[in-house]
Amino acid sequence: MSDEVTKTDAEWKASLTPEQYHVLRNHGTERAGTSPLDREKRQGIFHCAGCGLPLFASEAKFDSGTGWPSFFQPLDNAVETQEDRSWFMRRTEVHCRRCGGHLGHVFPDGPAPTGLRYCMNGVAMAFEPKAG
């Protein structure tokens, strides 16, 4: 994974909230149902809270019923994945391509057309509504 945005640990702590730091830099998970982005219905773009890279379009968002914002596909060249073997299971972890921030996990139980569910931590993202 290439990190185009590099900061020291102190710089990350200074630029993120404690919750964002926990998720983005320490691979944490926010509690299900706590993110207002799970209920966000407006048109727009979801960006990385760490570096601002556009990650997901609202057109790819769906209600997975999990309590986390879910998408069936990311924007082109937005995320990278790697295997996560924590918690005695094998999952696919999703990171921001530009800063390496942990966003969540992707699962093979999503809707068409991809069949994927990008289950993201809302605190790891910021939403920019479409103008107008």
Image (cartoon, helix red, strand yellow):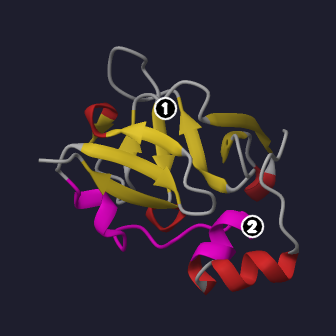
Kindly state the secondary structure of the residue where label 1 is placed: loop
Q: Is residue 109 left or right of residue 132?
A: right
Above or below residue 9? Residue 74 is above
Q: Nearer the viewer, residue 8 or 60?
A: 8
Residue of label 1? 74
Local secondary structure at mark 2: helix
Taking the spot 38% from the left edge, 44% from the top edge, the residue there is 70
Amino acid under label 1?
Answer: Pro
Q: Residues within 10 Å of mark 2 (few under 14, many from 20)?
A: many
Measuring from the top left, give residue 58's x and y in whole percent: 29, 40
Q: Nearer the viewer, residue 120 or 5?
A: 5
Q: From what the image shows, is residue 122 above or below residue 31?
A: above
Measured as percent of width and height from the top left, residue 50 is found at 62, 63
**Does the magenta-highlighted stretch encompass residue 13?**
no
Q: Residue at x 27, y 45 (%)?
A: 44
Q: Quadrant of the N terminus?
A: top right
Res 72 visible: yes
* Residue denoted by label 2: 25
Mark 2 residue type: Arg
Q: Is residue 63 visible?
A: no
Query: Between marks 2 and 1, how big is the CA–CA gap?
Result: 20 Å
